[in-house]
Image (tube, helix red, strand yellow):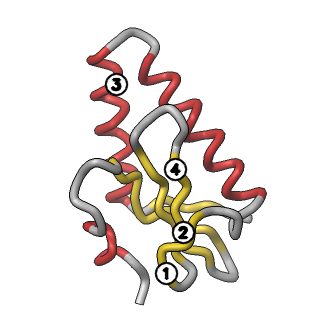
Amino acid sequence: MKVRLLDPAVAELDEAVAWYRALAPGLAERFLDEVRAARQRICDHPDAWHPLGDDVRRFRLERFPYGIIYVINEAEILIVAIAHLHREPGYWRSRLPK
C-alpha cells in the first residue's frame, strides 16, 4: 500500500532529526531507522496499531517519545503527524481529511 506524508509531518520529522543530530552522534540515524521500520510495519499491518478514531491510528516508536499518526483509506496510508508524545496532544486533528 502506498504511504504519503503530509507536509507538516515531513517538517516534524525534519525537526526531530535535527534535534537528535545535535544531541548525540548517531542518534538521528537511529531515530530515522526506527521511523523507517515503523513505516514498513504500518504498511504490512495498517489495522494493527492503536485506534484514535475512525480510520485514525497511532504507532508508537519504541525507543523515542514519538508516535506516527496515520489515516487509512482505500488508496493509501496518509501520515498526518510525527507527534512528540509529551507535547500538546491532539494538535494534529485539524490535519485529518474531511
Please give the name of the residue rendered at 50% of the width and 22% of the height, measured from the top-left corner.
29
Sequence-earlier tag: 3 or 2 = 3
Residue 74, picture quadrant: bottom right
Judged from the image, the secondary structure of the residue bearing numbered disc 1 is: strand
Judged from the image, the secondary structure of the residue bearing numbered disc 4 is: strand
C-alpha span from label 1 to label 2? 7 Å
Work out whether residue 11 can be spotted.
no
Do labels 4 and 3 touch, CB within 8 Å? no
Please give the name of the residue rendered at 64% of the width and 72% of the height, measured from the top-left corner.
76
Name the residue beneath numbered marker 1: 53
As drawn, the residue found furthest toward the top would be: 25
Dividing the image into 4 quarters, which one contains the N terminus? bottom right
Do labels 3 and 2 touch, CB within 8 Å? no
Sequence-earlier tag: 4 or 1 = 1
> As shown in the figure, which amino acid type bears the numbered disc 4?
Arg
C-alpha span from label 2 to label 4? 10 Å
In the displayed structure, would residue 39 be above or below residue 98? above
The numbered mark at residue 20 is: 3
Please give the name of the residue rendered at 62% of the width and 49% of the height, measured from the top-left corner.
39
Do labels 1 and 2 touch, CB within 8 Å? no
Name the residue beneath numbered marker 4: 60
Across and down, in percent, residue 2 comes to 68, 63
Direction from residue 68 to residue 65 in the image, left or right? left
Mark 1 nearby-residue class (10 Å; few <14, some 14–19, many ≥20): few
Name the residue beneath numbered marker 2: 57
C-alpha span from label 1 to label 3? 30 Å
